[in-house]
Amino acid sequence: MDPKEFSVRLGQEEIGRIFNLKENLDLKDLLVTYAPHYQQLGWALVGIKSPEGLPLELDLGQPAETWTQQLSEMGVDQSQINLGIRTGKASNLLVLEVNKGEGALSLDQWGDWRADCVAEMGGCREQHYYALPLETQAPPSYFLAPQVLIYGEEGLLLAPPSVEPQAREPWRWLRPPWETPPLPPKPAVWQFLKEHIPAALVKPEMKSWEEIYRIIAPHG
């Protein structure tokens, strides 16, 4: 065959597979870059299979060199791998995932609520990261607030550089936590949580010894 007449034609399926493979490889490289930063912050990490959202048997709490080989052995034929963070007391984190339209407006009515540590996805959603004080009860995770997802106790959050399965858009840091560490929630955040999380989901907070002593002291 004349070489000039020889051509290789790729179908749409093959082209899509090539781009998916590259995307997965790039994402794995980013995981290796981001995970150690999160480990230093004391955040509990989970590898997540996308789009199913199932946790993987991948111990991201170990040093990167111990799990990168396992990550590689999973192969490019595996589904996309995302990086999850356990919120609440596991990482001392509260995160509000906010629709930048109605969600932000529903929070604005309570005052200044925005965090210093923020991630963004597709220009339409933001994650606001807050550090939970050690003595503070972690609020429960709750996903029925108006255009706001509340990641508190027992929450599992997709963090940068994860790709949102439905939107196919990556989460990226606007102000990363290793440069702008999360601060405690502002009063407006607590007011919003009190308004929208059903009281039945909130566990009674244990009183401090000082409070208990003030109650029992008059009774000898």
Image (cartoon, rainbow, N blue to C red):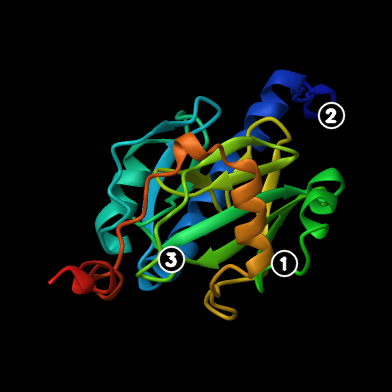
Q: Which residue is drawn at 76% across and 55% down?
A: 107
Which residue is identified by label 1? Answer: 114
Quadrant of the image containing the N terminus: top right
The CA distance from mark 1 to mark 2 is 61 Å
Where is residue 109? Give x, y as percent. Answer: 83, 57
Precedes in sequence: disc 3 or disc 2:
2
Crowdedness near tag 2: few (<14), some (14–19) or many (≥20) residues, C-alpha within 10 Å: few
Which residue is identified by label 2? Answer: 4
Q: Quadrant of residue 36?
A: bottom left
Left or right: 79, with 103 as reference point: left
Does the image show residue 77?
yes
Q: What element carries label 3?
A: helix
Crowdedness near tag 3: few (<14), some (14–19) or many (≥20) residues, C-alpha within 10 Å: some
Q: Is mark 2 on a helix, strand or loop?
A: helix
Left or right: 186, with 35 as reference point: right
User: 207 or 54, which is in the foreground?
Assistant: 207
Left or right: 144, with 52 as reference point: right
Precedes in sequence: disc 1 or disc 3:
3
**Amino acid under label 3?**
Tyr
Quadrant of the image containing the C terminus: bottom left
Mark closer to the observer (3, 2): 3
Residue reaching furthest left? 220
Which residue is identified by label 3? Answer: 38
Where 34 sits versus 13, above or below? below
Where is residue 75? Give x, y as percent. Answer: 40, 35
Does the image show residue 173?
no
Crowdedness near tag 1: few (<14), some (14–19) or many (≥20) residues, C-alpha within 10 Å: some
Precedes in sequence: disc 1 or disc 2:
2
Where is residue 193? Give x, y as percent. Answer: 61, 51
Mark closer to the observer (1, 2): 1
User: 46 or 101, which is in the foreground?
Assistant: 101
The CA distance from mark 1 to mark 3 is 21 Å
